[in-house]
Image (tube, rainbow, N blue to C red):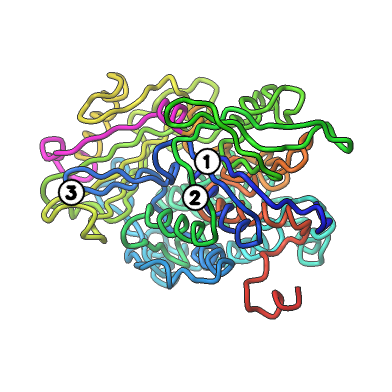
Amino acid sequence: MRNKTTKPRTAVVIGGGITGLATAALLARDGLEVTVLEKNATVGGRTGSWETDGFRFDTGPSWYLMPEVFDHFFRLLGTSADEQLDLVQLDPGYRVYFEGDGAPVDVQATREKNIALFESLEPGAGARLAAYLDSAADVYDMAKKRFLYSTFASFLPLLRPDVLSRGPRLARLLLQPLSSFVAGKFTDSRIRQILGYPAVFLGSSPFTTPSMYHLMSRLDLEDGVLYPRGGFHRLITVIAALAESEGVKVQVNADVTRIRTEPDGRRRARATGVEYRDAAGNPAAVEADLVVSAADLHHTETALLPPALQTYPEKYWKSRIPGPGGILLHLGVRGELPQLLHHTLLFTKDWKANFEKIFGKNTSVPDPASLYICRPSATDTDAAPAGQENLFVLVPVPSDPGLGTGGIDGAGDPGLEKLADTVIGQIASWADIPDLAERVTVRRTVGPGDFHSDFNSWRGTLLGPAHVLKQSAFFRGSNASRKVTNLLYAGGSTLPGIGLPMCLISAELVLKRLRGETGTEALPEPGTAAERQG
């Protein structure tokens, strides 16, 4: 694939979520004729949107972190985040309620304010947070330079002085869990939870996530949290438009059923296109020199390829650890809710037991649960009718489709709707909104069963494989099939991992793999000296 004379001319991308659209846009800009096939009626995948009665709900991601990754992606397409998005700085960044503690903690928008905040919670914690954030920044910068943008097709670029000189420290950070790393520096339980919670963004628990991921605190405590006005589905609208402007063809209601292959003299097979069912259920096909699956990797491998051509067969997944499942609530609420910020978190006192119920051997739905609430109407007037509020609630639960599917106005599975009632009651109690349930005018629930059916999500997981040590960086697996030439993978279930920024990087890694680029740094942006030299 490094030989320019054999470079694919056509490509088909499976999946029209943010990863699939971003991948298609980059490939088309690189000169390929690209078709995107999306199984659902609209593009966006998990980054979806639902509108009713004047409310506009984002149905998935809601934290805008790592803004430089978004901007870099847009610059690869000749534009910028400033040109495409109206970004708002959230100040405070988010609020946290702690079980049994009536006073919430508002995490601030700047490093200096958060140092002062931590000092007010625990004497001496301000200086320790400053050192913690310095460490997080150092690891974050190295991760961006050496790990996140690497396909790991070659390990030689990793043998650089900046990596080797940090070898012993990196080893300690990889082997020590985030929870004990934080506990060794802070005693206040509220601080420990604030610093441990970013593990959830990685689909994991602070008790199993490597402490290398303390780098995440650089994002919210130092860089701050942004919000794209118009909601996160605005990202999908923008990226889809950029892809189409590059000539990408997007077809919805196209459920891919098989990756076509033919014998290859050098390897076992070569991808030649895909077969799918159209909106009427009729069989159809697309021929292509390159197939990129931005669908769930487990589904791609075990459902779209025969056993002999599976790089990651079912037995591989038996030893993998999924991220959490999720129960989602979309609530339209009459009246204002000043008790909640744009982002609000509720943390249980028995922190470890909460995560054990989600990730342990004998799983169950935590009660009470640590959960997350997004109130975009606090920032965006278009998210709800005047005088009303828009709430998105996420309850991390075990990744088990058997927990059920949701519905509108209580029409979901009875067990899941009962859990939703419990969650509404918990929010009402902890945030002192006693009449919350009576004020709900719009209600929609989503469960792990929906993620399994709508997105072919492995075990109904909300995010993808958890970022434990054996599923991070080069242990996460390859973004190229080892048995099928010209079959590449992208998305949260492959390199580099979970989250919207990682999905955009994943799209770029497809382009790097196609070009034979083995360097660890991001591709040069158009117009830069590095790009002109390249």
**Above or below 420: residue 498:** below
Upstream in the sequence, badge 3 or badge 2?
A: 2
Q: What residue is disc 3 on?
A: 54
Any magenta on residue 447?
yes
> What residue is drawn where x is 65% and y is 61%?
30
Q: Amino acid at mark 3?
A: Gly
Residue 352: where, in percent of width, then height? 47, 35
**Residue 523 lies in quadrant:** bottom right
- Kind of residue at badge 1: Leu
Instruction: Looking at the picture, tell me which residue is in the foreground, 331 or 143.
Output: 331
Measured in 3D between alpha carbons, the distance from the residue under mark 1 to the one under mark 3, in whole angstroms, is 30 Å
Q: Which mark is residue 37?
A: 1
Q: Position of residue 327 (x, y in %)?
A: 36, 33
Q: Is residue 201 visible?
A: yes
Q: Who comes first in sequence, dot 2 or dot 1?
A: 2
Q: Secondary structure at mark 3?
A: loop
Q: Residues within 10 Å of mark 3 (few under 14, many from 20)?
A: few
Q: Which residue is mark 2?
A: 18
Residue found at the very far bottom of the displayed protein: 529
| Residue under the image location 59 percent in, 50 percent down | 34
Q: Identify the mark at residue 396; answer none if there is no mark.
A: none
What type is the residue that disc 2 sits on? Ile
* 34 lies above or below 72: above
> Which tag is nearer the camera, tag 1 or tag 3?
1
**What secondary structure is marked by label 1?**
strand
Left or right of residue 483: residue 143: left
